[in-house]
Amino acid sequence: MKKQASVLLVMAIALLFVQCAKRGNPTGGPEDNDPPKFVRATPENFSVNFDQKEIRIYFDEYIKLQNAQKQIIVSPPMDPKPDITPLGSPSKYIKIIIKDTLQENTTYAFNFGQSVVDNNEGNPQPFFKYVFSTGSYIDSLSVSGSVKDALLKDADPFISVMLYEIDENYSDSLVYNQPPRYITNTLDSLKTFELSNLKEGTYQLVAVKDLNNNYKYDPGKEKIAFLDRPITIPTDTIYELNLFKEVLSFKPERPKQTGLQKLLIGYRGDVELDSIQIEPIFGAPADFKTTLTKVEGKDSLNLWFQPKIDSDTLKFTLKTPETLDTLLTRITQLPKDSLSINTEPSGNIDFGKDFILRSSTPLVDFNKDMITVLDQDSVAVDFISELRPKESSLHVKFEKTENQTYYLSILPGAVTDFYNGTNDSIVKTVRTKALSDYGNVTLNLQNVRSFPILVQLTDEKGVVKAEKFSDSESTLRFDYLNPAKYLIRVIYDTNENRKWDTGNYLKKTKPEQIIYFPDLIDVRANWDINQSFMLN
């Protein structure tokens, strides 16, 4: 019995060791939500009389720098920029190598935004900042505010906010070719800013959507905002900046031949087609004629000419009220453009919308007697035709009723293009939906500061879906809206040209003011919305 008990005891002990040696599945632990903690720095944070070329900033765990190019801001900017690591591989410290010659008696700030994250979970150390001064004290003044978009409801992320010191060397053109004295940004989720560690003085405050991160303003590509007066620091004023994209002066590029009698001319800026004059210099016959059309959705013009050119070179002037350019292009034998017609819409047509004929070549004439519109009972429907030569289109406008079918017939030869080409026979059918498929909105505008105003309904991306102009009425009705969510905006049309006008930095003109209704409106089928809008 004693021997049997001993054997059982040995087996029990062995089994215990086996169980202890087995590997179990990890049960995990509480998720780490703690950000990395700053431990120390060499030289110390907020050092004075700084004269080092290398900085090390230590944390309590392995970290990495995330989205560093956008998140990390050095103010004042350094040129060349410092080397800051680690960018990809983890480390317990950040190393900064300064390459620039530091200015005397200046406070520098490395704003890391939310770029410092722990290596495993990516928890950010929010708005960590390393500061030093090459003088005997740290500058401690600050300026704060918000950034908005002059046209869109929400501003872009990562807007650079800059201060230029106004001294004997200051001019408005510095924003184009020199970095600012101080800089910060709005980061990704915030539309507010704070410029800190500033010294007392007078400054110009601007904001730029700095796409290439060069601390300068590149007009035509980037948006800018500015105050129309300098600011004096210290100040307790909260500033608001409105970003806008300038329209540059018109400048054509070198033409490119795209058809036997057609040139493509890219351009920058803005121009009215009716204001452009074309005059041949050489290469064109005596009976040379031209017309221009806009390429939809692009900053380009189509220059159509006749008769065809036998020379291998065409030189001409392009004149606007403000500019005169001489353009030259090579001419080769390419296929000739011929008239073809597309129509829109197909299928359903909305109330208040036109039936449109779009031509591949410029339209110059039409014969209304060769166009008919019939309803489903073969009853003729009255219509109005409008030729839009610059758009190469013909609009057919007629009153519509619900649940109706309309037949449009355009006989051969009804429209004529720039080259005396005419259309073939066109027969199209379009239908209307029931009125109950649409929603309607009545807007009651309150506190309108001045007239005229332009009231627009847009989608969430700012694409205009409906608009009305008013020079006195503050109650406006939008009928036959397709069910969707809309933004409402009111434009103070100060120059009465029925469109929104942007600003100009050097001329110190601000964009026309836009006020957005704070919420989306949900337009549903067979609903009428009566909405008050206080224009504060």
Image: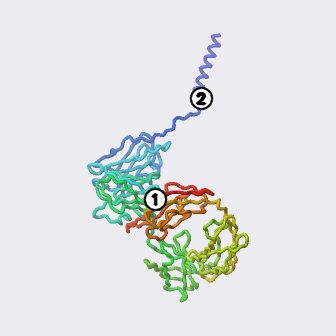
Identified by mark 1, the residue type is: Leu
Q: Residue at x 65, y 62 (%)?
A: 435
Query: Which residue in the rendered view is the most extreme toward the bottom?
Result: 286
Identified by mark 2, the residue type is: Lys
Q: Residue at x 54, y 86 (%)?
A: 288
- Residue bearing the label numbered 2: 22
How far separated are the C-alphas under marks 1 and 2? 72 Å
Instruction: Please tell me which residue lies in front, 470 or 33.
Output: 470
Identify whether 191 is placed above or below 291: above
Instruction: Please tell me which residue lies in front, 289 or 356.
Output: 356
Instruction: Please tell me which residue lies in front, 265 or 332.
Output: 265
Q: Position of residue 19 (x, y in %)?
A: 60, 26
Secondary structure of the residue carrying tag 1 is: loop
Q: What's the mark number on residue 535?
A: 1
Task: Please report whichever mark, 1 or 2, sits nearer to the chain's N-terminal start.
Answer: 2
Instruction: Indicate the quadrant containing the C terminus: top left, top right, bottom left or bottom right.
Output: bottom left
In the figure, is residue 196 to the left or right of 260? left
In the figure, is residue 55 to the left or right of 490? left
Q: Position of residue 398 (x, y in %)?
A: 63, 72
